[in-house]
Image (tube, rainbow, N blue to C red):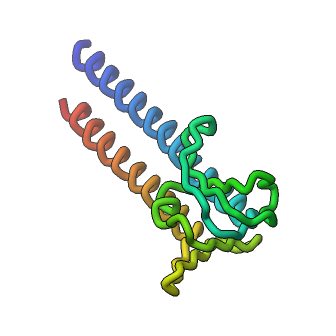
Amino acid sequence: MGFLKDNLMRLILVCTVIIAFFFIAQYLTMDEKFYNSMLEMRKQKKFSGIVVEKYIDTFEHSTPMLKLNNNNNNNNNNNDVPLENEFWDSIMVGDSVVKIRGQAEINVYRNDSTKIILNYKDYYKELIERSKKKIDEEFNTISRYVSTVYLL
């Protein structure tokens, strides 16, 4: 009777861990859908102008912002443009920035004739790959745990 009870407990534990893994995997794969929708949102943005200020908007979840001097920004009456941290770090006050609606790139022009292209598609692709790597690591950890528990 003890043998059956021990194996039943192990089986229940293994099944519980596997089910938990699938819930975690489902949660983490939602990141890919989220990042793809963020990419589409970013592609629809349009702005251009010269950066007159860089700041962190503490009222909007500490979002990195650029203040541009151009009044032609779409949906940005105050000329403030939110950016991802990695892009914000690459831009300096005095740079000219151009983002065309429908494209995934921000073109940054410096006074010394330097041109930098910041690509949202590459940025979100990297985030999706990190998310998938995280899922693989979780799966490997749980697999090792399940193997250990089952062998006990």
Q: Residue furthest top?
A: 1
- Residue 83 falls in image quadrant: bottom right
Compared to residue 4, the image places residue 65 above or below, namely below
Q: Name the spot of residue 108 as percent of width and height, x first.
A: 57, 75
Note whether 36 is above or below 111 in the view shown.
above
- The residue under the point 53% across, 78% down is 110
Q: Residue furthest bottom?
A: 113
- Foreground residue among 89 and 26: 89
* Extreme residue in the left direction: 152
- From the top left corner, tell me how far across and down residue 48 is, in percent: 71, 70
- Looking at the image, residue 124 sits to the left or right of residue 7; the answer is right
Depth check: 88 or 39 in front?
88
Q: Quadrant of residue 121?
A: bottom right
Image point 62% across, 35% down: which residue? 59
**Residue 152 at x, y percent in the picture:** 18, 29
Q: Nearer the viewer, residue 16 or 150?
A: 16
Q: Residue at x 51, y 36 (%)?
A: 23
Residue at (61% x, 64% y) in the render: 51
Q: Is residue 34 above or below residue 150?
A: below
Report whether 117 appears left or right of 37. left
Question: Which of 95 and 46 lies nearest the eye of the viewer?
Answer: 95
In what quadrant of the picture does the N terminus appear? top left
Taking the image as shown, residue 141 lies to the left or right of residue 85, namely left
Q: How many badges with numbers are in the image?
A: 0
